[in-house]
Image: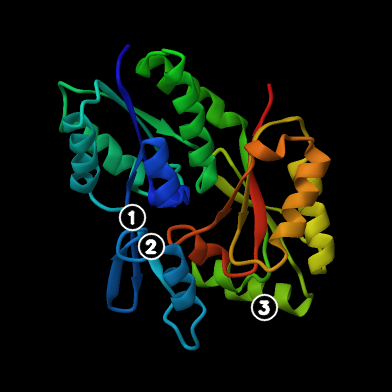
């Protein structure tokens, strides 16, 4: 049986300890606060990121993909440790330059078997595909077939997040200052959806309670195959998670609850709740 290694990037929001235990390698992306740059998950933990992010007068962090050399270094490490092939699941090419760096890195290793998967999302949308790939590898499925299936199933992934404010989308350049001002004036708690790598507004409830409720409705609108709950240091995450699990009927033991980290967090801001969902076909 071929030894298949799995790689993702820090936009996956996988806890480094969880990823290491599962055998998933993570390419750290870059996050910069003012003049200080860090490798997400390496030089800056998720907890440290949120401490900086929410500090008074903190500069707004900027995120960026690292170069092909950083991806190649992780691929090289996997092969050096005995991998026969790599399946690399990365953040959507529509959201980051990471996919381009991954493809260039694979091109630097023409004699190696590397299959690049576009998750068509971010955060635990990547993680869901990585764990699905691991399950397939344990059954003896080839790396080529795993890559094909994961690229295909990425179209069944969705991500929904109930935001506390539009301010961080404005700072990240996703919406205009006027849109943010109007949303604040109307006390809008928007819900964003990520589908096929595109971020869109799914709904614009007027209160936090209505936004949470609508977010749960969207998550549970279809039969769910795999589910990961996401939050950005939200105090009500336990209640939100319990309600999503109850309504979805998903086995609680299969659900991962993850704090969004430095690669995705700046665009959401603190206090958000949501989920990455793989729907059944």
Q: Label 2, label 1: how many angstroms apart (C-alpha)?
A: 8 Å
SS at badge 1: loop
- Quadrant of the rendered image containing residue 63: bottom left
Q: Which callout, 1 or 3, points to the residue nearer the camera?
A: 1
Q: Is 215 on the left-hand or right-hand side of 28?
A: right
Q: Residue at x 47, y 19 (%)?
A: 136
Depth check: give the residue in front, 40 or 238. 238
Q: Residue at x 49, y 71 (%)?
A: 50
- Vertical position of residue 248 compared to residue 49: above or below: above
Q: Label 2, label 3: how many angstroms apart (C-alpha)?
A: 24 Å
Identify the residue under disc 2. 63
Q: How is the image coloured?
A: rainbow
Contact between labelled residues 1 and 2, with CB atoms less than 8 Å apart: yes
Q: Which callout, 2 or 3, points to the residue nearer the camera?
A: 2
Q: Which of the marked residues, 1 or 3, is nearer the chain's N terminus?
A: 1
Residue 29's tag is 1
- Vertical position of residue 64 compared to residue 216: above or below: below
Q: Quadrant of the N terminus?
A: top left
Q: Is 184 on the left-hand or right-hand side of 42?
A: right
Q: Quadrant of the C terminus?
A: top right
Q: From this viewpoint, is residue 185 visible? A: yes
Q: Residue at x 36, y 18 (%)?
A: 143
Depth check: give the residue in front, 117 or 132. 132
């Amino acid at each position: 049986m071929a030894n298949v290694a799995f790689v993702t990037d820090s936009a996956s929001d996988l806890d480094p300890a969880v990823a290491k235990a599962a055998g998933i390698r993570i390419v750290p992306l870059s996050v910069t606060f003012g003049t200080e740059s860090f490798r997400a998950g390496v030089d800056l933990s998720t907890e440290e990121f949120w401490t900086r992010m929410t500090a008074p007068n903190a500069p707004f962090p900027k995120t960026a993909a690292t170069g092909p050399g950083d991806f190649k270094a992780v691929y090289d490490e996997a092969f050096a440790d005995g991998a026969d092939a790599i399946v690399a699941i990365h953040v959507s090419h529509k959201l980051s330059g990471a996919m381009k760096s991954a493809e260039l890195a694979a091109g630097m290793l023409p004699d190696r078997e590397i299959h690049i998967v576009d998750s068509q999302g971010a955060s635990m949308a990547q993680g869901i595909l990585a764990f699905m790939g691991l399950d397939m590898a344990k059954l003896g499925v080839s790396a080529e077939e795993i890559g094909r299936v994961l690229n295909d199933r990425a179209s069944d992934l969705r991500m929904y997040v109930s935001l506390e404010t539009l301010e961080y989308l404005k700072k990240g350049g996703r919406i205009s200052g006027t849109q943010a001002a109007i949303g604040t004036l109307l006390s809008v708690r928007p819900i964003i959806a990520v589908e096929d790598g595109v971020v869109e507004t799914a709904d614009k409830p007027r209160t936090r309670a209505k936004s949470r409720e609508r977010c749960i409705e969207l998550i549970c609108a279809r039969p769910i195959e795999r589910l990961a709950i996401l939050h950005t240091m939200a105090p009500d995450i336990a209640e939100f998670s319990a309600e999503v699990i109850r309504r979805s009927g998903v086995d609680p033991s299969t659900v991962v609850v993850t704090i969004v980290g430095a690669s995705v967090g700046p665009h959401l801001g603190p206090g958000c709740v949501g989920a990455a969902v793989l729907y059944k076909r």
